[in-house]
Protein backbone atom coordinates (compact mmCIF):
# COMPACT_ATOMS: atom_id res chain seq x y z
CA UNK A 1 0.00 0.00 0.00
CA UNK A 2 1.42 3.37 -1.01
CA UNK A 3 1.81 5.92 1.73
CA UNK A 4 -0.80 8.62 0.89
CA UNK A 5 1.58 11.29 2.21
CA UNK A 6 4.20 10.32 -0.37
CA UNK A 7 3.80 11.80 -3.89
CA UNK A 8 2.92 9.32 -6.62
CA UNK A 9 5.66 10.77 -8.86
CA UNK A 10 9.06 12.15 -7.92
CA UNK A 11 9.61 15.87 -8.13
CA UNK A 12 12.46 17.31 -10.21
CA UNK A 13 14.45 20.52 -9.98
CA UNK A 14 16.70 21.63 -12.85
CA UNK A 15 16.59 18.15 -14.34
CA UNK A 16 17.44 16.30 -11.10
CA UNK A 17 15.11 14.42 -8.70
CA UNK A 18 14.50 16.13 -5.37
CA UNK A 19 15.30 13.92 -2.42
CA UNK A 20 12.35 13.04 -0.20
CA UNK A 21 9.67 13.59 -2.86
CA UNK A 22 8.95 9.99 -3.85
CA UNK A 23 12.22 9.24 -5.58
CA UNK A 24 13.26 5.60 -5.20
CA UNK A 25 16.89 5.14 -6.20
CA UNK A 26 17.55 1.70 -7.76
CA UNK A 27 19.69 -0.61 -5.62
CA UNK A 28 23.41 -0.22 -6.13
CA UNK A 29 23.09 3.22 -7.75
CA UNK A 30 24.46 6.48 -6.29
CA UNK A 31 22.12 8.72 -4.41
CA UNK A 32 20.18 11.60 -5.89
CA UNK A 33 22.33 14.46 -7.08
CA UNK A 34 22.39 17.54 -4.94
CA UNK A 35 22.35 21.05 -6.44
CA UNK A 36 25.79 22.31 -7.52
CA UNK A 37 27.10 25.85 -6.94
CA UNK A 38 27.36 26.49 -10.70
CA UNK A 39 23.84 25.31 -11.54
CA UNK A 40 21.99 27.93 -13.61
CA UNK A 41 19.25 29.93 -11.98
CA UNK A 42 15.84 29.34 -13.52
CA UNK A 43 14.12 32.62 -14.33
CA UNK A 44 10.56 33.04 -15.53
CA UNK A 45 11.01 34.62 -19.00
CA UNK A 46 7.60 36.25 -18.75
CA UNK A 47 8.93 38.48 -15.96
CA UNK A 48 11.77 39.90 -18.12
CA UNK A 49 10.76 43.10 -19.92
CA UNK A 50 11.13 42.99 -23.69
CA UNK A 51 14.01 45.10 -25.08
CA UNK A 52 13.23 48.25 -27.00
CA UNK A 53 13.37 47.16 -30.68
CA UNK A 54 14.06 50.69 -31.92
CA UNK A 55 16.89 52.24 -29.88
CA UNK A 56 17.50 55.91 -30.52
CA UNK A 57 20.64 56.38 -32.57
CA UNK A 58 22.93 59.29 -31.86
CA UNK A 59 23.16 61.99 -34.53
CA UNK A 60 26.28 61.33 -36.64
CA UNK A 61 29.09 63.78 -36.04
CA UNK A 62 30.69 65.80 -38.82
CA UNK A 63 33.84 64.59 -40.54
CA UNK A 64 37.07 65.81 -38.96
CA UNK A 65 38.75 66.69 -42.27
CA UNK A 66 37.28 68.76 -45.06
CA UNK A 67 36.77 66.73 -48.23
CA UNK A 68 37.27 69.85 -50.36
CA UNK A 69 40.63 71.14 -49.13
CA UNK A 70 41.76 68.77 -46.39
CA UNK A 71 41.39 71.46 -43.72
CA UNK A 72 40.08 70.94 -40.22
CA UNK A 73 36.31 70.90 -39.68
CA UNK A 74 35.11 72.89 -36.69
CA UNK A 75 32.49 71.72 -34.20
CA UNK A 76 29.83 73.62 -36.16
CA UNK A 77 30.39 71.28 -39.13
CA UNK A 78 32.13 73.81 -41.41
CA UNK A 79 35.72 73.83 -42.65
CA UNK A 80 37.90 76.39 -40.88
CA UNK A 81 39.87 77.04 -44.09
CA UNK A 82 37.49 77.00 -47.08
CA UNK A 83 34.17 77.28 -45.24
CA UNK A 84 32.61 74.24 -46.94
CA UNK A 85 30.00 72.32 -44.95
CA UNK A 86 31.21 68.83 -44.08
CA UNK A 87 28.88 65.87 -44.62
CA UNK A 88 27.69 63.78 -41.69
CA UNK A 89 29.38 60.46 -41.05
CA UNK A 90 26.45 58.61 -42.64
CA UNK A 91 26.73 60.73 -45.78
CA UNK A 92 30.46 60.09 -46.08
CA UNK A 93 32.61 57.75 -44.03
CA UNK A 94 35.95 56.00 -44.43
CA UNK A 95 37.59 52.91 -42.95
CA UNK A 96 41.19 51.73 -42.87
CA UNK A 97 41.50 48.68 -40.61
CA UNK A 98 45.12 48.11 -41.74
CA UNK A 99 47.71 49.98 -43.79
CA UNK A 100 47.01 47.82 -46.87
CA UNK A 101 43.18 48.14 -46.78
CA UNK A 102 41.01 51.23 -47.26
CA UNK A 103 37.35 51.97 -47.97
CA UNK A 104 35.19 55.01 -48.67
CA UNK A 105 31.39 55.35 -48.81
CA UNK A 106 29.71 58.53 -50.09
CA UNK A 107 26.19 59.82 -50.73
CA UNK A 108 27.06 61.09 -54.19
CA UNK A 109 25.28 64.05 -55.76
CA UNK A 110 21.76 63.10 -56.81
CA UNK A 111 20.47 61.09 -53.84
CA UNK A 112 19.09 62.75 -50.73
CA UNK A 113 20.60 60.13 -48.42
CA UNK A 114 23.38 57.55 -48.51
CA UNK A 115 21.83 54.09 -48.82
CA UNK A 116 25.21 52.46 -49.49
CA UNK A 117 27.11 50.89 -46.61
CA UNK A 118 30.39 49.09 -46.13
CA UNK A 119 32.32 47.33 -43.38
CA UNK A 120 35.92 46.10 -43.35
CA UNK A 121 38.44 44.25 -41.21
CA UNK A 122 42.06 43.22 -41.75
CA UNK A 123 45.09 41.77 -40.03
CA UNK A 124 48.11 44.04 -39.78
CA UNK A 125 50.44 41.83 -41.84
CA UNK A 126 50.54 43.03 -45.44
CA UNK A 127 48.31 40.94 -47.71
CA UNK A 128 47.55 38.38 -45.00
CA UNK A 129 43.81 38.42 -44.21
CA UNK A 130 41.09 40.96 -44.99
CA UNK A 131 37.30 41.16 -45.12
CA UNK A 132 35.56 43.68 -47.42
CA UNK A 133 31.76 44.00 -47.42
CA UNK A 134 29.45 46.34 -49.37
CA UNK A 135 25.64 46.51 -49.13
CA UNK A 136 23.69 48.83 -51.45
CA UNK A 137 20.24 49.73 -50.14
CA UNK A 138 17.34 49.71 -52.59
CA UNK A 139 16.18 53.30 -53.04
CA UNK A 140 12.47 52.48 -53.28
CA UNK A 141 12.45 50.58 -49.97
CA UNK A 142 11.86 52.06 -46.54
CA UNK A 143 14.82 52.50 -44.15
CA UNK A 144 17.21 50.84 -46.58
CA UNK A 145 20.04 53.11 -45.42
CA UNK A 146 19.76 51.84 -41.84
CA UNK A 147 19.22 48.23 -42.92
CA UNK A 148 22.17 48.22 -45.35
CA UNK A 149 24.60 49.48 -42.71
CA UNK A 150 23.38 46.90 -40.18
CA UNK A 151 23.67 44.14 -42.80
CA UNK A 152 27.22 45.08 -43.82
CA UNK A 153 28.47 45.11 -40.25
CA UNK A 154 26.72 41.87 -39.35
CA UNK A 155 28.19 40.08 -42.39
CA UNK A 156 31.66 41.43 -41.65
CA UNK A 157 31.54 40.09 -38.10
CA UNK A 158 30.66 36.60 -39.33
CA UNK A 159 33.43 36.59 -41.94
CA UNK A 160 35.95 37.84 -39.38
CA UNK A 161 35.13 35.05 -36.92
CA UNK A 162 35.36 32.25 -39.51
CA UNK A 163 38.79 30.76 -40.09
CA UNK A 164 38.55 28.54 -43.19
CA UNK A 165 42.31 28.76 -43.76
CA UNK A 166 42.74 26.30 -40.90
CA UNK A 167 41.08 23.52 -42.92
CA UNK A 168 43.48 20.78 -44.03
CA UNK A 169 42.82 20.43 -47.76
CA UNK A 170 41.73 22.77 -50.56
CA UNK A 171 38.43 20.91 -50.95
CA UNK A 172 37.52 21.25 -47.27
CA UNK A 173 38.68 24.86 -47.30
CA UNK A 174 36.43 25.70 -50.25
CA UNK A 175 33.47 24.02 -48.57
CA UNK A 176 34.15 25.94 -45.37
CA UNK A 177 34.33 29.25 -47.28
CA UNK A 178 31.04 28.58 -49.06
CA UNK A 179 29.37 27.82 -45.75
CA UNK A 180 30.91 30.90 -44.16
CA UNK A 181 29.63 33.18 -46.93
CA UNK A 182 26.17 31.60 -46.73
CA UNK A 183 26.05 32.23 -42.98
CA UNK A 184 27.27 35.82 -43.42
CA UNK A 185 24.51 36.52 -45.97
CA UNK A 186 21.90 34.88 -43.74
CA UNK A 187 22.93 36.96 -40.73
CA UNK A 188 22.95 40.09 -42.91
CA UNK A 189 19.46 39.19 -44.11
CA UNK A 190 18.31 38.90 -40.49
CA UNK A 191 19.76 42.36 -39.83
CA UNK A 192 17.72 43.79 -42.71
CA UNK A 193 14.60 42.07 -41.39
CA UNK A 194 15.24 43.48 -37.90
CA UNK A 195 15.09 46.99 -39.35
CA UNK A 196 11.87 46.38 -41.26
CA UNK A 197 8.58 47.32 -39.63
CA UNK A 198 5.86 44.67 -39.57
CA UNK A 199 3.46 45.06 -42.45
CA UNK A 200 5.69 47.52 -44.32
CA UNK A 201 4.53 47.82 -47.94
CA UNK A 202 8.04 48.63 -49.17
CA UNK A 203 10.25 46.53 -46.87
CA UNK A 204 13.93 47.37 -46.53
CA UNK A 205 16.18 45.62 -49.05
CA UNK A 206 19.81 45.74 -50.13
CA UNK A 207 22.46 43.96 -52.15
CA UNK A 208 25.37 42.06 -50.63
CA UNK A 209 28.93 41.49 -51.83
CA UNK A 210 31.97 40.43 -49.84
CA UNK A 211 35.57 39.49 -50.48
CA UNK A 212 37.73 37.42 -48.16
CA UNK A 213 41.48 37.73 -48.76
CA UNK A 214 43.61 34.89 -47.41
CA UNK A 215 47.23 35.47 -48.40
CA UNK A 216 47.35 35.01 -52.19
CA UNK A 217 43.82 33.60 -52.50
CA UNK A 218 40.70 35.76 -52.87
CA UNK A 219 37.16 34.49 -52.27
CA UNK A 220 34.17 36.58 -53.35
CA UNK A 221 30.42 36.09 -53.03
CA UNK A 222 27.39 38.24 -53.80
CA UNK A 223 23.63 38.64 -53.87
CA UNK A 224 22.50 41.44 -56.18
CA UNK A 225 24.59 43.67 -58.44
CA UNK A 226 27.36 44.96 -56.19
CA UNK A 227 30.68 43.58 -57.40
CA UNK A 228 34.17 42.33 -56.56
CA UNK A 229 37.07 42.81 -59.01
CA UNK A 230 40.63 41.59 -59.32
CA UNK A 231 42.72 44.41 -60.84
CA UNK A 232 46.40 43.51 -61.37
CA UNK A 233 49.17 46.08 -61.80
CA UNK A 234 49.75 44.64 -65.27
CA UNK A 235 47.70 42.29 -67.40
CA UNK A 236 43.99 41.59 -67.58
CA UNK A 237 41.71 42.01 -64.61
CA UNK A 238 38.54 40.07 -63.85
CA UNK A 239 35.08 40.44 -62.35
CA UNK A 240 34.99 37.91 -59.50
CA UNK A 241 31.21 37.98 -59.06
CA UNK A 242 28.18 37.54 -61.30
CA UNK A 243 25.43 40.16 -61.01
CA UNK A 244 21.90 39.10 -60.11
CA UNK A 245 20.30 41.57 -62.51
CA UNK A 246 18.37 41.88 -65.74
CA UNK A 247 21.54 43.16 -67.43
CA UNK A 248 23.49 40.04 -66.47
CA UNK A 249 20.67 37.83 -67.74
CA UNK A 250 20.84 39.68 -71.06
CA UNK A 251 24.61 39.23 -71.20
CA UNK A 252 24.19 35.51 -70.58
CA UNK A 253 21.83 35.34 -73.54
CA UNK A 254 24.41 36.94 -75.86
CA UNK A 255 23.76 40.68 -75.59
CA UNK A 256 27.04 42.70 -75.49
CA UNK A 257 27.85 44.02 -72.01
CA UNK A 258 27.81 47.69 -73.04
CA UNK A 259 24.36 47.31 -74.56
CA UNK A 260 22.94 45.22 -71.71
CA UNK A 261 24.20 47.56 -68.98
CA UNK A 262 22.72 50.66 -70.61
CA UNK A 263 19.23 49.20 -71.09
CA UNK A 264 16.29 50.71 -69.23
CA UNK A 265 15.98 47.71 -66.89
CA UNK A 266 19.72 47.07 -66.53
CA UNK A 267 19.85 47.76 -62.78
CA UNK A 268 16.74 45.77 -61.92
CA UNK A 269 18.09 43.17 -59.50
CA UNK A 270 16.75 39.62 -59.40
CA UNK A 271 18.08 38.74 -55.93
CA UNK A 272 18.45 40.82 -52.78
CA UNK A 273 18.45 40.72 -48.98
CA UNK A 274 15.19 41.47 -47.16
CA UNK A 275 12.05 39.94 -45.69
CA UNK A 276 10.63 39.41 -49.19
CA UNK A 277 13.79 37.76 -50.57
CA UNK A 278 13.39 34.25 -51.97
CA UNK A 279 17.09 33.26 -52.09
CA UNK A 280 19.94 34.82 -50.11
CA UNK A 281 22.65 32.18 -50.64
CA UNK A 282 25.58 33.96 -52.31
CA UNK A 283 27.41 32.69 -55.35
CA UNK A 284 31.02 32.16 -54.24
CA UNK A 285 34.09 32.16 -56.49
CA UNK A 286 37.81 32.07 -55.77
CA UNK A 287 41.07 32.80 -57.53
CA UNK A 288 44.77 32.56 -56.78
CA UNK A 289 46.36 35.98 -57.13
CA UNK A 290 49.13 35.66 -59.74
CA UNK A 291 50.96 38.87 -58.81
CA UNK A 292 50.62 42.33 -57.26
CA UNK A 293 47.37 44.20 -57.68
CA UNK A 294 44.15 45.30 -56.02
CA UNK A 295 40.98 43.59 -54.83
CA UNK A 296 38.12 46.03 -55.31
CA UNK A 297 34.65 45.60 -53.77
CA UNK A 298 32.19 48.27 -54.84
CA UNK A 299 28.59 49.26 -55.48
CA UNK A 300 27.12 50.08 -58.88
CA UNK A 301 27.49 53.76 -58.07
CA UNK A 302 31.16 53.25 -58.98
CA UNK A 303 31.28 50.47 -61.58
CA UNK A 304 28.36 51.91 -63.56
CA UNK A 305 30.82 54.45 -64.99
CA UNK A 306 33.53 51.85 -65.71
CA UNK A 307 32.16 48.33 -65.86
CA UNK A 308 34.86 46.41 -67.71
CA UNK A 309 37.90 45.32 -65.66
CA UNK A 310 40.20 47.22 -68.04
CA UNK A 311 38.16 50.40 -67.56
CA UNK A 312 37.91 50.31 -63.79
CA UNK A 313 41.53 49.17 -63.61
CA UNK A 314 42.50 52.45 -65.29
CA UNK A 315 40.35 54.31 -62.77
CA UNK A 316 42.39 52.69 -59.99
CA UNK A 317 45.74 53.52 -61.59
CA UNK A 318 44.63 57.12 -62.21
CA UNK A 319 43.38 57.34 -58.63
CA UNK A 320 46.81 56.26 -57.38
CA UNK A 321 48.36 59.18 -59.24
CA UNK A 322 45.67 61.60 -58.06
CA UNK A 323 46.05 60.51 -54.44
CA UNK A 324 49.84 60.80 -54.62
CA UNK A 325 49.52 64.31 -56.04
CA UNK A 326 46.99 65.31 -53.39
CA UNK A 327 49.27 64.00 -50.63
CA UNK A 328 52.27 65.85 -52.02
CA UNK A 329 50.30 69.12 -52.15
CA UNK A 330 49.23 68.59 -48.55
CA UNK A 331 52.87 68.08 -47.57
CA UNK A 332 53.91 71.26 -49.35
CA UNK A 333 51.20 73.20 -47.55
CA UNK A 334 52.93 72.37 -44.26
CA UNK A 335 55.98 74.47 -43.48
CA UNK A 336 58.07 71.60 -42.15
CA UNK A 337 56.52 68.21 -42.97
CA UNK A 338 57.68 65.24 -40.90
CA UNK A 339 60.66 63.57 -42.55
CA UNK A 340 59.16 60.14 -41.93
CA UNK A 341 55.91 60.85 -43.80
CA UNK A 342 55.61 58.83 -47.01
CA UNK A 343 54.77 60.42 -50.34
CA UNK A 344 53.01 57.22 -51.44
CA UNK A 345 49.25 57.34 -50.98
CA UNK A 346 47.36 54.86 -48.81
CA UNK A 347 44.50 52.60 -49.99
CA UNK A 348 41.91 54.81 -48.28
CA UNK A 349 43.27 57.85 -50.12
CA UNK A 350 43.11 55.95 -53.41
CA UNK A 351 39.53 54.85 -52.65
CA UNK A 352 38.68 58.48 -51.87
CA UNK A 353 40.10 59.55 -55.25
CA UNK A 354 37.97 56.88 -56.95
CA UNK A 355 34.85 58.13 -55.20
CA UNK A 356 35.67 61.70 -56.23
CA UNK A 357 36.09 60.47 -59.81
CA UNK A 358 32.60 58.90 -59.72
CA UNK A 359 31.20 62.16 -58.34
CA UNK A 360 32.87 64.02 -61.22
CA UNK A 361 31.08 61.67 -63.65
CA UNK A 362 27.77 62.88 -62.21
CA UNK A 363 27.45 61.04 -58.88
CA UNK A 364 24.01 59.79 -59.86
CA UNK A 365 24.07 57.05 -57.21
CA UNK A 366 25.60 56.39 -53.81
CA UNK A 367 29.22 55.25 -54.11
CA UNK A 368 31.21 52.62 -52.19
CA UNK A 369 34.79 51.51 -52.86
CA UNK A 370 36.82 49.04 -50.77
CA UNK A 371 40.44 48.33 -51.74
CA UNK A 372 42.93 45.72 -50.52
CA UNK A 373 46.50 45.58 -51.79
CA UNK A 374 47.45 41.94 -52.41
CA UNK A 375 50.02 39.83 -54.22
CA UNK A 376 53.12 41.65 -53.02
CA UNK A 377 54.04 38.63 -50.92
CA UNK A 378 56.03 35.83 -52.65
CA UNK A 379 53.86 33.11 -54.16
CA UNK A 380 54.16 29.90 -52.06
CA UNK A 381 55.93 26.93 -53.59
CA UNK A 382 53.74 24.21 -55.11
CA UNK A 383 52.58 21.76 -52.41
CA UNK A 384 53.33 18.04 -52.45
CA UNK A 385 50.66 15.80 -54.00
CA UNK A 386 50.20 12.29 -52.63
CA UNK A 387 47.68 9.95 -54.28
CA UNK A 388 45.83 12.95 -55.64
CA UNK A 389 45.71 14.74 -52.26
CA UNK A 390 47.60 17.80 -51.08
CA UNK A 391 49.99 16.82 -48.29
CA UNK A 392 48.95 18.22 -44.91
CA UNK A 393 49.78 17.49 -41.29
CA UNK A 394 47.44 14.47 -41.56
CA UNK A 395 48.42 13.35 -45.10
CA UNK A 396 52.19 13.27 -45.38
CA UNK A 397 54.39 11.26 -47.78
CA UNK A 398 56.39 8.44 -46.29
CA UNK A 399 59.70 9.66 -44.93
CA UNK A 400 58.76 13.34 -44.95
CA UNK A 401 59.85 15.26 -41.90
CA UNK A 402 57.70 17.45 -39.73
CA UNK A 403 59.50 20.50 -41.14
CA UNK A 404 57.78 19.81 -44.49
CA UNK A 405 54.39 20.61 -42.99
CA UNK A 406 52.69 24.00 -43.30
CA UNK A 407 53.79 26.26 -40.46
CA UNK A 408 51.84 28.89 -38.57
CA UNK A 409 52.95 32.49 -38.98
CA UNK A 410 52.72 35.14 -36.31
CA UNK A 411 49.18 36.11 -37.35
CA UNK A 412 47.91 32.52 -37.24
CA UNK A 413 47.78 31.99 -41.02
CA UNK A 414 49.39 28.77 -42.15
CA UNK A 415 52.22 29.34 -44.61
CA UNK A 416 53.06 26.47 -47.01
CA UNK A 417 56.72 25.42 -46.96
CA UNK A 418 58.31 23.71 -49.94
CA UNK A 419 58.69 19.98 -49.29
CA UNK A 420 61.89 18.12 -50.14
CA UNK A 421 60.28 14.96 -51.54
CA UNK A 422 57.47 14.37 -54.04
CA UNK A 423 55.88 11.04 -54.98
CA UNK A 424 54.27 9.77 -58.17
CA UNK A 425 50.52 9.27 -57.43
CA UNK A 426 50.42 5.95 -59.35
CA UNK A 427 53.79 4.23 -58.79
CA UNK A 428 54.42 5.83 -55.37
CA UNK A 429 58.06 6.21 -56.40
CA UNK A 430 59.95 9.39 -55.47
CA UNK A 431 60.30 11.90 -58.29
CA UNK A 432 62.22 15.18 -58.61
CA UNK A 433 60.48 18.03 -56.82
CA UNK A 434 60.39 20.05 -60.06
CA UNK A 435 58.28 17.42 -61.88
CA UNK A 436 54.58 18.42 -61.97
CA UNK A 437 52.16 15.82 -60.64
CA UNK A 438 48.56 15.35 -61.72
CA UNK A 439 46.01 14.69 -59.01
Image (tube, helix red, strand yellow):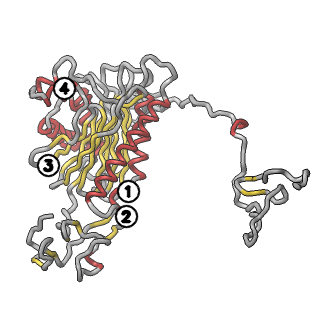
Assign a secondary structure to mark 4: helix
Q: Position of residue 361 (x, y in %)?
A: 20, 25
Q: How busy is the neighbourhood of tag 2: few (under 14 within 10 Å), some, or many (20 plus)?
A: few
Q: Nearer the viewer's eye, disc 4 or disc 2? A: 4
- Asked whether the viewer can see residue 78, the reply is no
Q: Do the residues labelled 1 and 2 touch (CB within 8 Å)?
A: yes
Q: How busy is the neighbourhood of tag 4: few (under 14 within 10 Å), some, or many (20 plus)?
A: many
Q: Which residue is drawn at 38% across and 39% down?
A: 185
Q: Is residue 201 left or right of residue 341?
A: right
Q: How busy is the neighbourhood of tag 3: few (under 14 within 10 Å), some, or many (20 plus)?
A: some
Q: Name the residue under label 2.
A: 412
User: Quick one: label 1 or label 2, which is nearer the N terminus?
Assistant: 1
Q: Nearer the viewer's eye, disc 1 or disc 2? A: 1
> Which circle marks residue 38 in the picture?
none
Q: Nearer the viewer's eye, disc 3 or disc 1? A: 1
User: Quick one: label 4 or label 3, which is nearer the N terminus?
Assistant: 3
Between the C-alphas of marks 3 and 1, the distance is 29 Å
User: Quick one: label 4 or label 2, which is nearer the N terminus?
Assistant: 4
Q: Name the residue under label 3.
A: 233
User: Quick one: label 3 or label 2, which is nearer the N terminus?
Assistant: 3
Q: How busy is the neighbourhood of tag 1: few (under 14 within 10 Å), some, or many (20 plus)?
A: some
Assign a secondary structure to mark 3: loop
Between the C-alphas of marks 3 and 2, the distance is 28 Å
Between the C-alphas of marks 1 and 4, the distance is 35 Å
Q: Mark 4 points at which residue?
A: 247
Please tell me which residue lies in front, 208 or 23. 23
Q: Position of residue 311 (x, y in %)?
A: 13, 35
Q: Nearer the viewer's eye, disc 4 or disc 3? A: 4
> Which circle marks residue 163 in the picture?
1
Between the C-alphas of marks 4 and 2, the distance is 41 Å
* Quarter occupied by residue 17: bottom right
Amino acid sequence: MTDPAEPAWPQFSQGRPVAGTGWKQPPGQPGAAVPRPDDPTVVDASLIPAPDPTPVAAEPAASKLCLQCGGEVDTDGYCTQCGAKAPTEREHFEESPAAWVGAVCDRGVKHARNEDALATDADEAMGSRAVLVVCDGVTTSTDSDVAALAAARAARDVLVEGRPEDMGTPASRSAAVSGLFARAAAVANDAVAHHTAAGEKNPAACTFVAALVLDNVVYAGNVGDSRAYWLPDSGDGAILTRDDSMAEDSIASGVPRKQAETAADAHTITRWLGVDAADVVPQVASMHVPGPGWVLVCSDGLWNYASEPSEIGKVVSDAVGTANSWREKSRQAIAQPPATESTVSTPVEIARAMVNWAIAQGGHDNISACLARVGDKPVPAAPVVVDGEIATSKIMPSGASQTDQPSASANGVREPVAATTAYDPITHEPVPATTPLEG
